[in-house]
Image (tube, helix red, strand yellow):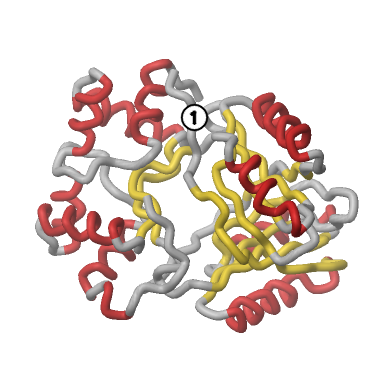
Amino acid sequence: MRLRRDPLPATALDATDRKILNALQAGFPISSRPFAEAGAALGIEEEDLIARILNMREIGAITRFGPFYDAAAMGGAFCLCAMEVPAARFDEVMTLVNAHPEVAHNYERNHRLNMWFVLAAVAPEGIEQVAREIEGETELCVLRFPKLEEFFVNFRVEL
Amino acid sequence: MSIDAIDRRLIGATQAGLPLTPAPYAAIAQHIGLSEDEVISRMQALQHQGVIRRVALAPNHYALGMTANGMSVWDVEDSHAHDLGAAVGALDFVSHCYLRPRAEGWPYNLFAMVHGSTGDEVETKRAQIAALLGAHCRASDILYSTRILKKTGMRIKEG
């Protein structure tokens, strides 16, 4: 899926699209005809709901549509990692880091620690292994910030 | 909490997203050789167990005008970290809230992702967190993302 960081024009989404975004952030049915079911609650036909989600995905208004898995609950593991990458090596290191399929997200940030990424692996040992591989390949230190406690959040983008 | 090999196949087939067709779970079922009923009942069970946090649509914050986000980080007294983390997570503009280990040159243990339409809005929200933490917070910083280097979502191997 294409990533866009620039805001869409105000006209890109209409009121119905906004209604869909607001409602389906919270959840989507697991049932035989889920678009029909979700659409009925919103007063939108099944076919129209599918077309609108397709369009919103196409124009980059949504990043994902589907199940969000808890890696830890699957016996997997996540770990936030950070690196201090010299500016002159940034692109080279980014390429090395991103080449690992375990790197799920990677952001450049305005700090001495300027590269922040999440590692996702089937098991905790996988995290450690990839972090060490990255350290070996880049000859830079990978700081590990595993979560010790996660707090409940109820964040929503209201449109 | 237990997941079996069939669940893993199901996770592998859905982690990139749901097909945008009227009966998406039937399409997944066909893809991995299960019945639609089994896919639905297994996914419902996974959601009940917390392996699936939710099935939902994830808006692209950037495309929708929430262009500013900051990873606020706080050095909070350990004895109050649990209660204060819960309070920060409950703020409606915080999308992720974790306790993480401190590191060499990194005194911060509480991480809270703050979203807003503008940098000023994020700074205002950061000040709200600072006020909430009060004297229990010894130092803080905020890191702004300047570039997305990779964003693929979690991938696990199909097993």
Residue B42 location in percent, x, y?
32, 26
Please say whether residue B87 is visible from this viewpoint. no
Above or below: residue A61 compared with residue A68: below
**In this rendering, would A18 be left or right of B11?**
left
Q: Say which quarter of the image contains residue B77.
A: bottom right
Residue B117 location in percent, x, y?
50, 78
Residue B103 location in percent, x, y?
85, 48
Residue flagged by tag 1: what amino acid is it? Ile
**In this rendering, would B157 be left or right of A33?**
right
Q: Which residue, given by chain and number where applicable, does mark 1 sit on? A: B156
The residue lying at 37 percent from left, 41 percent from top is A67
Question: Dot 1: within a 10 Å radius of its alpha carbon, few (fewer than 14), some, or many (20 or more) residues?
Answer: some
Above or below: residue A54 compared with residue A157: above
Chain of the residue displaying label 1: B
The quarter of the image holding the C terminus of chain A is bottom left
The residue nearer to you, when weighing A12 against A43, is A12
The residue lying at 43 percent from left, 22 percent from top is B158
What number of labels is visible? Answer: 1
Q: Tag 1's secondary structure? A: loop
**In this rendering, would B38 be left or right of A77?**
left
Please say whether residue B84 is visible from this viewpoint. yes
The residue lying at 41 percent from left, 16 percent from top is B5
The residue nearer to you, when weighing B110 against B85, is B110
**In this rendering, would B15 be left or right of A47?**
right
The residue lying at 74 percent from left, 77 percent from top is B131
